[in-house]
Amino acid sequence: MIGKFKNAYNYSRTLIECIENEKSFSLKINTGEFVFNTDVGEISFNNNMEKKCYSYCSMALTCCLYDSKTKAYEFIDKAQRLSYCDRTSTQ
C-alpha cells in the first residue's frame, strides 16, 4: 500500500463487491486462482472461502490504516462469520 490507502481501499471495495455477488463470483472465469503480490512474494488462493477471508481481512486492515475502525470491525466480523476463518487468526 505504501501510503496509497485510498487506492487500496477502492481496490478492496471493488474486489469485495465482486466476490459478494454470488452470480458473478460463481462464473467459470472467476473460479480460478487469485494471486496477490506482497513485499515477500506472491500469495494465492484457490477456493472461494480463502478468497473471501483474505479480501475481508485485507479490507479490515486497510480501513484501520485509513482510520476507519468502525468499518474495519465490520469486515473483521464478515471474515469471522466465514467457516474458513479461525476467530483467533482475525483478532
Image (spheres, rainbow, N blue to C red):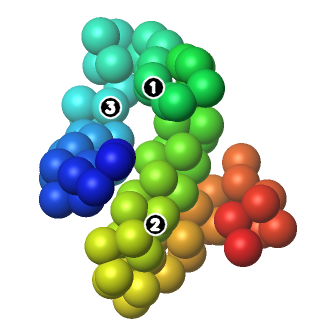
* Amino acid type of the residue tagged 3 in the rendering: Phe
Residue at 17% x, 49% y is 7
Callout 1: SS: strand
Residue at 49% x, 81% y is 73
| Residue 39 rendering spot, x and y as whole percentages | 52, 30
Q: In which quarter of the image is residue 50?
A: top right
Please determine whether, in this image, residue 13 is positioned above or below residue 23: below
> Is the C terminus in the top left, top right, bottom left or bottom right quadrant?
bottom right
- Mark whose residue sits in front, 3 or 1: 1
* Amino acid type of the residue tagged 1 in the rendering: Phe
Outermost bottom residue: 70
**Of 74 and 43, which appears nearest the observer?**
43
User: Residues under labels 3 and 1: Cα distance?
Assistant: 17 Å
Are discs 2 and 1 less than 8 Å apart at CB? no
Q: Quadrant of residue 67?
A: bottom left
The residue where tag 3 is placed is 25
- Tell which circle, 3 or 2, labels the residue nearer the N-terminal end: 3
Please determine whether, in this image, residue 70 is positioned above or below residue 35: below
- Mark whose residue sits in front, 3 or 2: 2
Callout 3: SS: helix
| Residue 47 rendering spot, x and y as whole percentages | 59, 26
* Amino acid type of the residue tagged 2 in the rendering: Ala
User: Residues under labels 3 and 2: Cα distance?
Assistant: 21 Å
Are discs 3 and 2 less than 8 Å apart at CB? no
| Residue 35 rendering spot, x and y as whole percentages | 46, 19
Q: Is residue 9 visible?
A: no
The residue where tag 1 is placed is 36
Crowding at dot 3, Cα within 10 Å, few <14 / some 14-19 / many 20+, comes out as: some
The residue where tag 2 is placed is 60
Callout 2: SS: helix
Q: Quadrant of residue 46?
A: top right
